Amino acid sequence: DQQVKQNSPSLSVQEGRISILNCDYTNSMFDYFLWYKKYPAEGPTFLISISSIKDKNEDGRFTVFLNKSAKHLSLHIVPSQPGDSAVYFCAASEGGATNKLIFGTGTLLAVQP
Amino acid sequence: KAGVTQTPRYLIKTRGQQVTLSCSPISGHRSVSWYQQTPGQGLQFLFEYFSETQRNKGNFPGRFSGRQFSNSRSEMNVSTLELGDSALYLCASIPGTGGSGEQFFGPGTRLTVL
């Protein structure tokens, strides 16, 4: 039962353009969402997060949008840079007394120079 | 501030053996979570510790166990290794107790079971 889904296994974008990575979830108890970036053989690196009480959070080139009614979130990277090429995971947490994260399957982003 | 340390970084074992992996969280962080990453299943939650107590456990067999020490360092153990246990094992260091904070991951331990 995949509670967090990233339906696009890969995405290719030109340098300088916008990258949009999507994530859908099924569990309405999730109240906190995070995006991580991962290179092979390394641990995930935190990018940005959003609480369920918000619909947008911005940090530099990264913006996360949350649509609770659609159970959908997206990560926008503007402008995209070749160094952004990595696997991006969205993750969700029910909050409360647990730190358990449910991860999506990841999207491989390739930013072409 | 030092990051999350995981040892060893690489490990090769044979079926039936057991293995112990170690994680030292960021100083001051009291919560540690463990995840398994495989190509087929992605990143899956193993267990979570706070103040030496297991607070949550993922859907893994009893061969997978862990513990946390008073200095917040954590170990996980896998007994009777199977080929399918080959994976990258990641430890996350968490500053708070609730589920609404950033989690800082270590570089992982790459376990290969032959």
Image (spheres, rainbow, N blue to C red):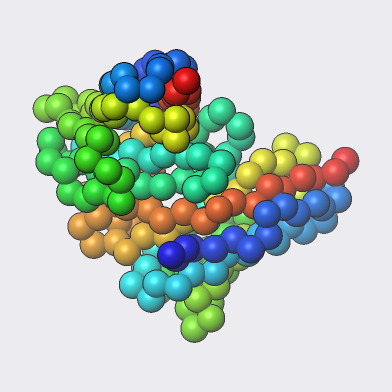
Judge by depth and name the residue closer to the eye, A100 or A51: A100
Is residue A77 rendered to the left or right of residue A48? right
Residue at the front extreme, as displayed:
B16
Quadrant containing the C terminus of chain A is top right
- Image x and y of residue B84, in percent: 44, 35
Identity of the residue furthest to the bottom in this view: A69
When the figure is inspected, residue B62 is found, relative to residue B67, above or below; the finding is below
Residue A108 seen in the figure:
yes
**Residue B43 percent location from the top left of the image:** 46, 46
**Residue A57, horizontal then vertical, whole percent:** 53, 63
Q: Answer left or right for A105 relative to A93.
A: right
Q: Which of B29 and A73 is in front in this view?
A: A73
Q: Where on the picture, by quarter, is residue B111?
A: top left
Q: Is residue B111 left or right of residue B49?
A: right
**Considering only vertical position in the picture, is B97 above or below B93?**
below
Residue B47 quadrant? top left
* Residue for point 76% across, 49% down: A80
**B33, above or below A72, in the image:** above
Tell me if residue B101 can be seen. no
Q: Which residue is drawn at 41% across and 56% down?
A: A102
Q: How many marks?
A: 0
Q: Residue at x 25, y 35 (%)?
A: B63
Image quadrant containing the N terminus of chain A:
bottom left
Q: Position of residue B105 (x, y in %)?
A: 42, 36
Q: Which residue is drawn at 33% across and 57% down?
A: B100
